Amino acid sequence: PPEKLPTAADIVIIGGGIVGVSTAWFLAKQGISVVLCEKGHVAGEQSGRNWGWVRVQGRDTREIPMMLESQRIWEGLAEEIGEDVGFTRGGCFFTANSSKELQSFEKWVDIARDYDIGTRLINGTELKKYVPGSAVDWAGAMFTETDGRAEPHKATPAIARAAERSGATILSSCAVRGVETAAGSVSSVVTEHGTIKTSTVLCAAGAWTSMFCRSLGID
């Protein structure tokens, strides 16, 4: 638990997963005063257990520009923060059990071409070169070689430490209990260890978001 709380911040972030710590890092780099409150420890829940996808393949077209920017950030992230985040570009396969299923991927390949993404369809013979020894005799796959993944249990704490070095305050074992308002606007957050004055709150609490928001009358 924190020995003391900051009295105020420009923004308070609720949740120490990948969304919360990344937001804290980007804000702190801009000179914004930010405090992150995590009820347990950083990457203690979903952000320490997910598959770490940094994938553009198969995305909704509205997500593609964001994912391309995400890949650009991840590519240089370890060098920028000085820590290993486990990022690799090993490619992504959507396998097909039949020629009909393989043909169904052609629509997204056309979309990828519009964004200059090198997605292509490969047949079963070529797929076996990438995935040798498989017990499944796939008809082929949609393949995006530039897709990658990171190691969640490495990346999230590393980004949190980078945020701290940039001036953010990261508080673990510090659950947020509620939000106070004054004249219709946010005035502070109430934590289990005291109150932090702020005008802006970002809820990045993952699966706990709905529970927290219900306490504020938000469904």
Image (spheres, grey):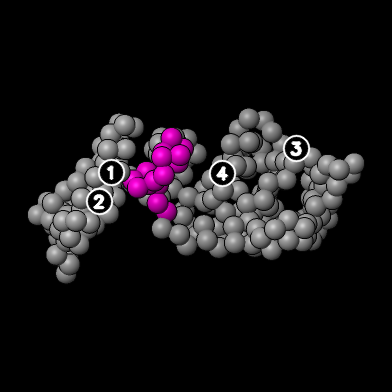
- Among the two numbered marks 1 and 4 on one chain, the one whose residue lies closer to the N terminus: 4
Q: Quadrant of residue 97?
A: bottom left
Across and down, in percent, residue 145 comes to 26, 43
Q: Main secondary structure of the magenta part?
A: loop
Mark 1 vs mark 4, foreground winner is 1
Nearest the camera: 143 or 166?
A: 143
Determine the CA span between mark 2 and mark 3: 48 Å
Identify the image quadrant of the N terminus. Answer: bottom right
Q: Are marks 1 and 3 in contact (CB under 8 Å)?
A: no
Q: Quadrant of the C terminus?
A: bottom right
Above or below, 218 relative to 25: below
Are the residues tagged 1 and 2 within 8 Å (C-beta)?
A: yes
Is residue 67 something that shows in the picture? no
The percent coordinates of residue 149 (x first, y second) are 37, 50
- Circle 3 crowding by C-alpha within 10 Å: few under 14, some 14–19, many from 20: some
User: Which circle's residue, 4 or 3, is located before the other in the chain?
Assistant: 3
**Residue 10: image tag:** 3
Q: What's the residue at 82%, 47% (across, down)?
A: 188
- In the image, which residues are magenta? 52-67
In the image, what residue occupies the spot 13% across and 51% down? 123
Label 2 to label 4: alpha-carbon separation? 36 Å
Which comes sooner in the sequence, label 1 or label 3?
Answer: 3
Tell me, for residue 22, which label it has, or none. 4
Instruction: Verify CB contact (< 8 Å) between mark 2 and mark 4.
Output: no
- Tag 2 residue: 104
Residue labelled with disc 1: 107
The answer to whether residue 153 is left or right of residue 208 is left
